[in-house]
Amino acid sequence: MKFGMKNLLVAVLALFVGQVAVAQTEAAAPAKDYDGTAEVSSMITNGNTKNQTTGLAFDLNYKPDPWLVNLKSKYLTTVSQEVQTQEMFEARVVVDERCRRSSRFSQITPT
């Protein structure tokens, strides 16, 4: 089978058209109003003493135009020798309005 210039051109064109179709499909997807993360952690140690640390955290962003709402929460507890030695709970809500103008940020690092 001979692979000529015409076949090469058709193959390249097919790849290009496929990429353009995928890019248009991705661009047409609606923007999500929600995004976030969740974390679960646990550390257990045994030896001369028995320690257990457990943590939960989440971060949720809600972006209805023109607002930005950020909700963060975390919980941490430590138990040592069946006695609770530490417990922490933190929650934060930030509501902000988006700026309609563009802005630029720069970072200066010392050399």
Image (cartoon, rainbow, N blue to C red):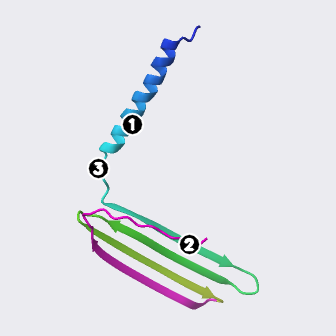
- Looking at the image, which is closer to me, 107 or 90? 107
What's the residue at 49%, 75% (across, down)?
56
Circles 1 and 2: CB atoms closer than 8 Å = no
Q: Is residue 13 above or below residue 71?
A: above
Tell me if 12 is positioned left or right of 63 in this view.
right
Q: Earlier in the sequence, mark 3 or mark 1?
A: 1
User: Percent x, y for residue 68?
Assistant: 29, 69
Q: Quadrant of residue 65?
A: bottom left
Question: Looking at numbered disc 2 in the image, what kind of residue is underneath it?
Answer: Ser
Q: Quadrant of the C terminus?
A: bottom right
Q: Which type of secondary structure does the marked residue at label 3 adopt?
A: loop
Residue 1's disc number: none
Q: Is residue 88 magenta?
A: yes
Location of residue 2 in the rendering, given as x and y in whole percent from the top left corner: 58, 8
Q: Nearer the viewer, residue 96 or 50?
A: 96
The magenta segment: 82-111
99 relative to 10, above or below: below
- Crowd tier of the residue under label 1, counting other residues whose Cα lies within 10 Å: few below 14, some 14–19, many 20 or above: few
Circle on res. 41: 2
Report the disc number at residue 30. Answer: 3
Task: Return the x and y of residue 26 as percentages of the image width and height.
Answer: 36, 43
The answer to whether the residues at label 3 and label 1 have Cβ atoms under 8 Å apart is no
Residue that label 1 marks: 22
**Tag 1 secondary structure:** helix
Q: Amino acid at mark 1?
A: Val
Q: CA distance from mark 2 to mark 3?
A: 33 Å
> Measuring 62% from the left and 81% from the top, which residue is drawn there?
52
For this view, does 51 lie left or right of residue 31?
A: right
Residue 84 vs residue 36, the one in the foreground: 36
In this rendering, position of residue 101 left or right of residue 60: left
Mark 3–mark 1 Cα distance, whole angstroms, equals: 15 Å
In the image, what residue type sits under mark 3?
Pro
